[in-house]
Amino acid sequence: MDQTVSPRPDHAANSSHVAGPSSAVAAPNALLDAALDAHRSGDLDRADALYRDALAHNPSNADALHYYGVLHHQRGNARYAAHLMDDALAIFADDPACWSNRGLVAAALGQPDAAHAYYLRALRLQPAFADAHNNLGVLLQSQRLYDDAAHHYQSALDIDPSHIDAHLNLGTTLAKLERHDEALACYANALSLDPRSASAYFNAGNCFDDIGDADAAIVHFRRAIAIQPDFAEAHVNLGSVIGKRGDYAQAELHYRDALALKRSPTHLVCVGASLAAQGRVDDEEAFYRAALELDPGHADAHQNLAWALLRRGDYPEGWAAYAKRWRAQDYAHIAVAGVPEWHGESLDGKRLLLVGEQGFGDQLQFVRYASVLAERGAIVDVSVRAPLVELVATVPGVHRVFSGQPEGDAASQYDFWVSMMSVPSCVRTGLDTIPAALPYLSAQPDAVERWRERVTAVAPTQRKIGLVWAGSPTFGNDRYRSMPFDTLATLGDADATACFSLQKGAAGEPARLASAALKPHDFTADLHDFTDTAALIMNLDLVIAVDTGVAHLAAALGKPVWLMLPFNSDWRWLDGRSDSPWYPGMRVFRQTHLGDWTPVLADIRTILHTHDV
């Protein structure tokens, strides 16, 4: 299932270290002496003037050229810095600090291979050069060569145990390698050297967030902010941790703090997402559009804008925005190498691979487009997550279905590939053109018959209702999408009704221990995959579910579904509707206040008591 995205900036950018002017530099004249002193003290304007005077006096002074280049690098003028340092190295090629700094400039210019060569040259001249090891580590980490990066950070620390940047960078790299305890030890080492290191607290907060210790993450982000109140990324990540706990209003405050400090696309998207999560859907759109004004290609802004538009039924613009949701890394696990992505070209006689994306519910909802593509003349193969393969094979229009990526000759047979959730934009789906013929999934007849015997044995005459009350706890809005089993207890006294648990996982355990009025029959130990669940559902009269994959499964099988939605419901269910154009016959029950299921269950209970299913 999609969720409203509140991006968390990654760990703070690794700290490259400039080999700046030190007292060891041999100053051949008073002008360079004065320039170096001003540079060391941070008076860059005065240093700039003095370097120019020194070079006017002696244009071949390698130290003046080098450190004037450092100054321009620090001011963001990497091209001129490269020119100055190249002149310095042409005069004196045995200066390891200049080679290391030239590597920094090459990295800033997007020349990683050159930067790598410059760092190695510095290390050949001075093997015990901590800054060069650290800077090479930063470069390798940017290339996701985490083990190699960690080696160089450790080398820097072996040379200089007080190198704070190397401690921080090693911690960040170890966190990328999921060696979280070691990463936290690195941040503790950095804090022992500098107890007011906001970066160390920030990175430790990220690490605690990664391992699911929200309390510790919040403490560390707050300490980072206390030390450095203008630390925008710490405000954002604090908001994101708080938001994942369901306190979206508090998260909004921290996102707004970050936005006040730095008006960036990410911060604008975070504010908008927090508003959407609170159900304030009329307010969110302006923030996504503002983000796109700053960065027209911002993927999260396009995605969240798309959800806002689709939620209110603006499908033409919504699908167009949704088509721009991708970042390069999002393609990595679904794109088919060497095969063009389909954007609406003629499919007559073409072989196309339809690729599932996101959760089970998304794939169950959008696999219907296999039929649409087949009607356009395509031979449609489908790649989905493994538990769905057997079920998806029953969809009309599917030629073959498998899990994983085709490679080599298997990939070369396709003319196009396309993600399932990109098809609506390619075929211009509108509210009135949703392919909504039901059912488009089928259960195995022999399995249906086996389940009929078991269901009839425990409920021969009652109406039979399947229940799902919780989704995956890793889903961003699960706190509000799901409900405790006890919340369903009021449904237990409906006349002539037998309830069946369709709830897998730990969330189903309370139902197995229940002694209250609602104690559903529980066959979930025998539901090994979606085909088993489908066969059981075919023997039920109704499924009552929160927004999970089982709700999509039951609806796609053509069974009546009563869907219980939180106040901040997902975009696919539109705003304010009690039905769904995606699943004709589905009945939607919505919260009127975030977190309050009581009216929803009261409505369902009333209908169960007064109407036949």
Image: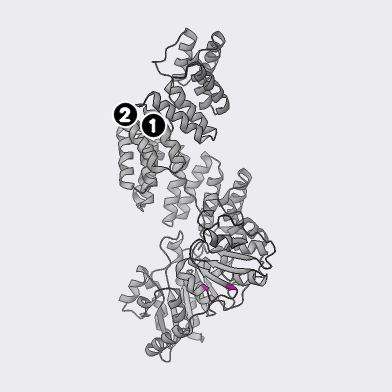
Q: Which mark is residue 133?
A: 1
Q: In whole angstroms, how far apart are the C-alphas of marks 2 and 1?
A: 10 Å
Residue 462 in which image quadrant: bottom left
Q: Is residue 395 magenta?
A: yes
**Residue 329 image point, x, y percent:** 52, 51
The label number, if any, that marks residue 325 in the structure image: none
Label 2–label 1 contact, CB within 8 A? yes
Q: Is residue 272 above or below residue 559?
A: above
Give the residue displayed 43% in from the left and 84% down from the top: 494
* Residue 504 at x, y percent in the picture: 39, 71
Let me know if residue 228 appears in the view: no
Span highlighted in magenta in the image: 392-398
Q: Which mark is residue 159?
A: 2
Judge the density around disc 1: few (<14), some (14-19), many (≥20) Cα neighbours within 10 Å: many
**Looking at the rendering, which quadrant does residue 220 occupy?**
top left
Mark 1: secondary structure:
helix
Task: Please say if 563 is above or below 416.
Answer: below
